[in-house]
Image: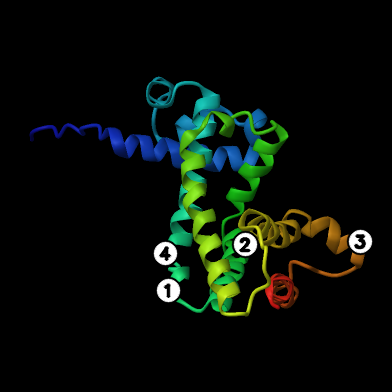
């Protein structure tokens, strides 16, 4: 019987390493992550990891870029400019909430990078390029709402997005301490649904004339 030789697929190997890195960094942070565990999880050796991604910090940056690209791609799929501006913002807030809830690794990686004062993403041209079109899209949606007389004037799209992200992010990043402080199970589905609706009300309440 002839022996089959398994050929290495460079792109598949890179994807496996990157997926493993995202799991490792989101679980242990940059400081606690171990290259050995990433290689083992990816079924690769450390030599290949270093070959494709350089050092540990470069791999962390690649993980950040991948997670940012994923959320920007998912936002684009919403086609927010093709609907009523009020519905656009409502859909964006709901999407942001759901994305944070369903992708806790994204928040974990952001927390880790903020602990390191964004030293990695400062080196990334890709992340800046991902955000610029999104902010411009928001600007057009806001302008459309202002023209229709449903949104207030003078709204900064970057400030608006920071507010949307903050309203959603804070709940998940502090859910355990807030549950203790207020004596409520904020992880319960009822509490999450109430807060999700509240997030929409807060953002639209600010925007509406």
Whether label 2 touches label 3, CB < 8 Å: no
Mark 4 is surrounded, within 10 Å at the Cα level, by few (under 14), some (14 to 19) or many (20 or more) other residues, namely few
Please report the residue visible at 90 percent of the width from the left and 66 percent of the height from the top: 182
User: What residue sits right under mark 2 in the picture?
Assistant: 101
User: Percent from the top left, x then y, of residue 74?
Assistant: 46, 60
x and y, in percent, of residue 20 in the image: 48, 39
* Distance (Cα) linking label 4 and label 2: 18 Å
Disc 2 crowd, CA 10 A, few/some/many (<14, 14-19, 20+): some
Q: Dot 2: what SS?
A: helix
Q: Nearer the viewer, residue 189 or 203?
A: 203
Q: Residue at x 60, y 71 (%)?
A: 94
As drawn, is 21 to the left or to the right of 172? left
Element class at badge 1: helix
In the foreground, 94 or 125: 125
Q: Nearer the viewer, mark 3 or mark 4?
A: 4
Identify the residue position indicated by label 3 in the image.
181
Mark 4 vs 1, N-terminal side: 4
- For marks 3 and 4, give the CA distance: 38 Å
Q: Nearer the viewer, mark 1 or mark 3?
A: 1
Residue 56 x, y percent position in the rendering: 53, 25
Residue at the spot of label 4: 77
- Locate residue 116 relative to residue 43 in the image: left or right: right
Q: Say which element carries label 3.
A: helix
Residue at x 62% of width, y 80% of height: 149
Label 4 and label 1: CA atoms lie apart by: 11 Å
Q: Which residue is mark 1?
A: 82
Mark 1 to mark 2: distance in Å? 26 Å
Circle nearer the viewer, 4 or 2: 4
Q: Mark 2 vs mark 3: which is more N-terminal?
A: 2
Labels 4 & 1 near each other (Cβ < 8 A): no
Quadrant showing the N terminus: top left
Sequence-first tag of 3 and 4: 4
């Amino acid at each position: 019987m002839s022996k089959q030789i398994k050929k290495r697929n460079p792109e598949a190997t890179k994807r496996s390493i990157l997926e493993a890195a995202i799991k490792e960094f989101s679980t242990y942070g940059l400081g606690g992550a171990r290259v050995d565990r990433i290689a083992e999880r990816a079924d690769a050796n450390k030599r290949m990891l270093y070959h494709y991604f350089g050092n540990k910090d470069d791999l962390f940056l690649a993980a950040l870029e991948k997670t940012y690209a994923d959320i920007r791609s998912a936002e684009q799929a919403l086609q927010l400019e093709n609907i009523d501006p009020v519905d656009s913002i409502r859909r964006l807030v709901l999407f942001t909430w759901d994305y944070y809830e369903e992708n806790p690794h994204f928040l974990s990686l952001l927390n880790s990078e903020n602990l390191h004062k964004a030293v990695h993403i400062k080196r990334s041209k890709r992340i800046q390029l991902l955000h610029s079109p999104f902010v411009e899209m928001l600007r057009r949606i806001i302008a459309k709402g202002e023209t229709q007389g449903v949104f207030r004037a003078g709204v900064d799209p970057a400030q608006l997005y920071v507010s949307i992200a903050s309203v959603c992010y804070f709940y998940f990043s502090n859910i355990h301490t807030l549950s203790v402080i207020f004596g409520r199970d904020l992880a319960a589905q009822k509490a999450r649904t109430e807060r999700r609706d509240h997030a929409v009300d807060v953002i639209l309440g600010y925007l509406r004339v």
